[in-house]
Image: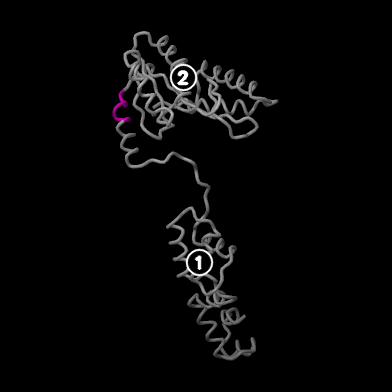
Amino acid sequence: MIIGYRARGGSISETAAFVKCSRSAVVNVYNNWKDQEGVQSRLANCGASRAINDRGERRLRRLVKCDRRNTVDTLTAQMNQQCTRKLSRTTLQRTLLRIGLRSRRLISAPMLTSVHRKKHRAFALQHKHWTLEQWKKVAFSDESRFLLHRIDGCWRTLIPVEGTLNSYAYLSIVADQVHPYVATVYPANDGLFQQDNATCHVSKIVPAWFEEHDEEFQLLPWPPNSPDLNPCENLWEHLDRQIRQKDPPPRNFTSYVMLCCSHGHRCLSSPSKHTSSP
């Protein structure tokens, strides 16, 4: 009312009489409004003070940056260790949002060290000029796990494996399945077999077996933690999606394996639109 009456041309005395306040109050309110501080300052000073001040916000930001996996409960406990005023979980959540820090779900991805990155770069430089005909000489392989009724079990591939896939079981698959396959597809003994660096692949007995058969086919050196280079990863995703859409779903192990093999061979017999290339 003071600002409106003064804006209409009322004097300080007239405004004070109209509003029923002192002349000094009229002067202070009007001057504060002209400086664009009055109303905002009064609103800012209204209500209780913030539980976390600017200094506390800076400390909270440091705690988050030190360990980005900290939960709100952990951060609340850490902040309360040095605060005289006890902070609630809700207060901390509001403060995090106010300073622009929001939680995100951690995405599972292979861990890459500096050594891994160097090996990735070396692999890319070595094979960046490979032609399609050269890549056709590579027999890619991979394992994937498919769950029956979402129960965490053993590994299942197009070649079903009973029990855990250790080095002995893997070598048996290589000798019984991979060896005749490579000999048939690459009769000129110029084929390459790709496998990742899983523990069952790099134990002593497996590389020793490949050395004994290096005149028939050779291993393609593979950089560590690089699943996206393998086109089989796209096939597993497509196969898993096809099986999940099956209605009714398979009820036992035998029907599940038959369904995996059926859809798997169908995926391999038709080019995939989502298959990546190295």
Q: Which mark is residue 192?
A: none
Element class at badge 1: helix
Within the magenta stretch, is there residue 143?
no
User: On the image, numbered disc 1 is attached to which residue?
Assistant: 79
Element class at badge 2: helix
Residue 271: image location, x then y, percent? 50, 19
User: On the image, numbered disc 2 is attached to which residue?
Assistant: 172
Please give the range of residues in magenta.
123-129
Per the picture, the main secondary structure of the magenta-coloured stretch is helix
The residue lying toward the viewer, choosing from 247 and 153, is 153
Task: Tell me what residue is drawn at x 48 percent, y 53 percent.
Answer: 69
Residue 273: image location, x then y, percent? 50, 24
Task: Tell me what residue is drawn at x 50 percent, y 64 percent.
Answer: 78
Residue 27: image location, x then y, percent? 53, 86
Which image quarter: residue 146? top right
Tell me the distance, in whole angstroms, between the alpha carbons under discs 2 and 1: 57 Å
